[in-house]
């Protein structure tokens, strides 16, 4: 029973991770170059509007399933208070992953609510693109950290 729940959560976590990371990379490597080639065609606005709800559901799923996975692995708030836990390879990877997840959340909110709309208004999307690329890099690093965690590292 416990194993089936764990597998179901892992499946959801991985599905959400591929949706999130794949979507972000598609924006960096396909949508932005297309928008550069055809400025004023409304490409990032239209694709952003269509994909954003999917991306937010994926991110929300990761943030819900992640702690549930930890809980099933027997890692709860009690362990977070032990310095020993954060000195272990698993704790170090988890700590780095959580800091990066926090950064991705903050940068995504900034990108979607402030920089993006401002870039569209002024016709200068430079800062939006830099932050978008940073979100892409961090998302790939989070994915790699997840693979390490799955190996117990
Ligand atoms: C953008 C957010 C996230 C991404 C892209 C992501 C991605 C991944 C990936 C790709 C794996 C590997 C799964 C496998 O190979 O079986 C993984 C595992 C894991 N993730 Fe995440 N994750 C995210 C957020 C979180 C959060 C917020 C937590 C916890 C608070 C978390 C906890 C875990 C744990 C504990 C595992 C290892 C499960 C195991 O032992 O197999 N993740 N993650």
Image (cartoon, rainbow, N blue to C red):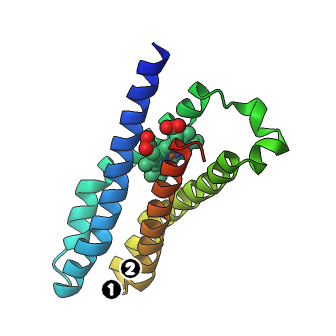
- Could you tell me residue 129's position as x and y percent? 39, 78
Q: Looking at the image, which is closer to me, 31 or 125?
A: 31
Residue where numbered disc 1 is placed: 123
Residue 55 seen anywhere in this rendered image of the structure: no
Residue 115 versus residue 125 in the image, above or below:
above
Q: Residue 34 occupies which quadrant of the picture?
A: bottom left
Please count the marks in the image.
2
Q: Residue at x 82, y 43 (%)?
A: 84
**58 sits to left or right of 80:** left
Q: Secondary structure at mark 1?
A: loop
- Could you tell me residue 81's position as x and y percent? 81, 38
Residue 106 versus residue 90 in the image, above or below:
below
Residue where numbered disc 2 is placed: 119
Q: Looking at the image, which is closer to me, 124 or 5?
A: 5
Q: Quadrant of the N terminus?
A: top left
**140 sits to left or right of 39:** right
Q: Residue at x 23, y 73 (%)?
A: 30
Q: Looking at the image, which is closer to me, 118 or 28?
A: 28
- Alpha carbons under labels 2 and 1: distance apart: 5 Å
Badge 1: residue crowd in 10 Å (few <14, some 14–19, many ≥20): few
For the residues bearing labels 2 and 1, Cβ distance under 8 angstroms = yes
Residue 35 versus residue 90 in the image, above or below:
below
Q: Residue at x 58, y 42 (%)?
A: 152
Q: Residue at x 59, y 33 (%)?
A: 70
- Could you tell me residue 24's position as x and y percent? 35, 63
């Amino acid at each position: 029973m416990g194993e089936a729940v764990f597998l179901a959560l892992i499946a959801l976590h991985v599905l959400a991770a591929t949706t999130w990371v794949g979507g972000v990379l598609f924006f960096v490597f396909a949508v932005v170059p297309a928008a550069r080639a055809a400025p004023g065609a409304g490409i990032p606005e239209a694709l952003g509007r269509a994909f954003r709800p999917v991306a937010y559901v994926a991110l929300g799923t990761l943030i819900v399933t992640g702690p549930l996975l930890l809980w099933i692995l027997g890692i709860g708030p009690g362990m977070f208070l032990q310095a020993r836990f954060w000195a272990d390879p698993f704790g170090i990877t988890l700590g780095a992953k959580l800091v990066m997840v926090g950064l991705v959340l903050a940068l995504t909110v900034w990108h979607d609510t402030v920089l993006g709309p401002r870039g569209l208004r002024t016709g200068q999307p430079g800062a939006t693109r830099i932050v978008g690329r940073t979100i892409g890099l961090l998302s790939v690093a989070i994915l790699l950290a997840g693979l390490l965690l799955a190996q117990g590292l």
